[in-house]
Amino acid sequence: MANDPFQQQDIWPMPAFYFKVTLDNLDDVFSFQEISGLDAETDAIEYRHGNSKDFSSFKMPGTRKVSSISMKKGMLLNGRNLREWQRDIEMNTPKPTNATIQLLDESGAPMMTWTLSNAWASKITFTDSPEADDAGIEVMVLEHEGLTVKNG
C-alpha cells in the first residue's frame, strides 16, 4: 500500500476561500473570502525582418498586462473596514502601496503568495444582500503595476 496515490496528502486541490491581504500603508491585515483577477498576460507581437527569406512573421513577447484585482469580504460589526482607502479615492489622492495576498490552508499557513507593486484602490463598494439573512459584503478593486507569484 506504500505506492497508493490516494494516501498522499499533496494530491488534493488547494482551497480558494481563505485569503489574507496585507497593505503596506495600513497597519492591519484583512481576510477575504473571494479574490479574482490574479493574472497577467503578455501581448504577442508579430514581426518579420525586412530581408527574411521566409514569407511569414514570427511572434515575440510584447507588453505585459495585469488585471484589476477584485476582493470580497463580509462586513463585520465593529470590524475594521475599507473606508480609509475610500476617502483617498473620493479625494482623488490614491496612495499607491505594495500589497501582499496570501492563499491560506485550513490551518492558516500560506500556500501561495501574490505581491502587487504600487497598488491602489480604484473602487470600494458596500453592498447588502437581497436576502434578509445574508451578510453585507465589502468589495474592493485594486489597480497595480506588477504581480509576482511564489509558493508558500
Image (spheres, rainbow, N blue to C red):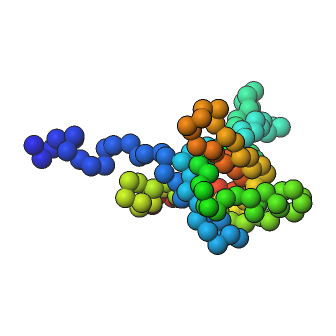
Relative to 82, does residue 45 appear above or below in the rendering?
above
Q: Is residue 100 visible?
A: no
Tell me the quarter of the image containing the C terminus.
bottom left
How many numbered marks are there? 0
Q: Residue at x 55, y 57 (%)?
A: 31
Q: Residue at x 16, y 41 (%)?
A: 4
Where is residue 64 drawn, in percent x and y? 72, 48
In front of the other: 39 or 47:
39
Asked where in the image residue 84 lies, by quadrant, the reply is bottom right
Where is residue 92 drawn, in percent x and y? 89, 58
Q: Residue at x 83, y 37 (%)?
A: 50
In front of the other: 125 or 1:
125
Q: Residue at x 41, y 54 (%)?
A: 105
Where is residue 118 drawn, in percent x and y? 74, 62
Q: Is residue 96 visible?
A: yes
Q: In the current view of this chain or complex, which residue is farthest to the front?
A: 132
Relative to 24, does residue 9 appear above or below in the rendering?
above
**Left or right placement of residue 113 versus residue 143 in this view:** left
Relative to 52, does residue 14 appear above or below in the rendering?
below
**Left or right placement of residue 106 versus residue 143 in this view:** left
Tell me the quarter of the image containing the N terminus.
top left
Where is residue 104 drawn, in percent x and y? 45, 56
